[in-house]
Amino acid sequence: MPTSSARTASALMARLGLAAPIIQAPMAGTSTPALAAAVSNAGGLGSLGLGATNADGARQAIAQTRALTSRPFGVNLFCHVPDAPDAASQARWLEYLAPAFAEFGAQPPAALREIYTSFVADDAMLEVLLAERPAVVSFHFGLPDPARIAALRDAGIYLMASATSPEEAHRIADAGLDAIVAQGVEAGGHRGIFHPDGHDDQLGTLALTRLLAARMDLPIVAAGGIMDGAGIAAVLALGAQAAQMGTAFVSCPESAADSAYRQALLAGAISTTSTRAISGRPARGIANRLTALGAAADCPPTPGYPHTYDAGKALHAAAKAHGSADFAAQWAGQAASLSRGLPAAELMRQLRAELAESVARLAPYGSARA
């Protein structure tokens, strides 16, 4: 007799059309139609990160992915509160970064732009989603308003959102979404916390997954520090219905990561850190000179997101023009040194084989308890 959690897991996989409980994280700027399609074609759920693009770019990315796969895939939107620019804060930050720009013969921008539009204020993006109807839409940094959620649900789209705490998870459930992504502090990229200046318990993936799976009815997708089949098996054992993996796929040739980013991931021992210095919101990546500037004793408060990111991208561009990746946003989770650099289809095959091996290894313990 299957348990209720097993029935939920089967329902989740059936609803998303998965042959394996693996979701490729929707990494804005790094995921591509080729990567998403390869993962979906291999039995997982591929994803597109649309938070850094506009409606036209989203429409094109969805069309390009559909040209490569007939299987379901997901898209992800940022739902941050739009940032009110603070001229004084921006000026202090640009002054702080000026010596780093000067190393490369460059000047900081005169002012910082709001380079990404939040989905909460993007009507054109909503129109694209309702017209294109991707199988899954997920949210990061919070939730859109009830009217947008209702419109997407009425279009038959499966809805998920990231939670970094039980409180955020309950807000997702109360909003009527279909599943919760439990993002542990180990995760690479931007932390999905709703209020970046609020209290953060810094819950790890295993603890958060178990808390949510034990106390909530919605399917839980575990995210953060999961790099192989053993990690997938671990979160499934704790009640997750799928694992969402980002860093594991960054070094795949289908991703948009540049050569310096790939080399850093495959270099062996990797130190990651959480910083606001790159974008203005907490995000985990490979430690470098920009993260060190953010940790310095004399570092001023960063401007808000995404204005800070405009400065970070400008500094990285100046450094990259001189062959330096010292100021890049190389997002990576705490287990990044397990990166493999395999094509996505091959990585999926290995993950599925490792998961089966891990489950088989654990089976005798389940029989003994029975």
Image (spheres, rainbow, N blue to C red):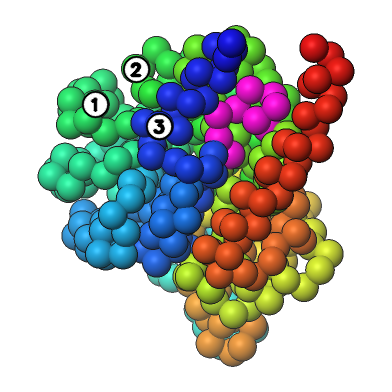
Residue at which label 2 appears: 176
Residue 240, image quadrant = top right
**Cβ–Cβ below 8 Å for labels 3 and 1?**
no
Neighbour tally class for label 1: few under 14, some 14-19, many 20 plus, Cα within 10 Å: some
Does residue 222 show up magenta in the picture?
no
The N terminus - image quarter: top right
- Does any portion of residue 26 appear in the rendered image? no
Residue at which label 1 appears: 153
Q: Which callout, 1 or 2, points at the residue further toward the start of the chain?
A: 1
Position of residue 127 measured from the top left corner of the image (x, y, whole percent): 14, 43
Which residue is at the front of the view, 51 or 158?
A: 158
Q: Amino acid at mark 1?
A: Arg
Position of residue 153 measured from the top left corner of the image (x, y, whole percent): 24, 26
Image point 71% across, 49% down: which residue? 354
Q: Which residues are magenta?
A: 235-243
In 3D space, how far apart are the residues under numbered discs 3 and 2 (Cα atoms)? 20 Å
In 3D space, how far apart are the residues under numbered discs 3 and 1 (Cα atoms)? 18 Å
Q: Which callout, 3 or 2, points at the residue further toward the start of the chain?
A: 3
Neighbour tally class for label 3: few under 14, some 14-19, many 20 plus, Cα within 10 Å: few
**Cβ–Cβ below 8 Å for labels 1 and 2?**
yes
Image point 80% across, 20% down: which residue? 367
Q: Is 299 placed left or right of 322 in the picture? A: right
Neighbour tally class for label 2: few under 14, some 14-19, many 20 plus, Cα within 10 Å: some
Position of residue 307 measured from the top left corner of the image (x, y, whole percent): 43, 54
Q: Is residue 162 above or below residue 11?
A: below
Helix, strand or loop status at disc 2: loop
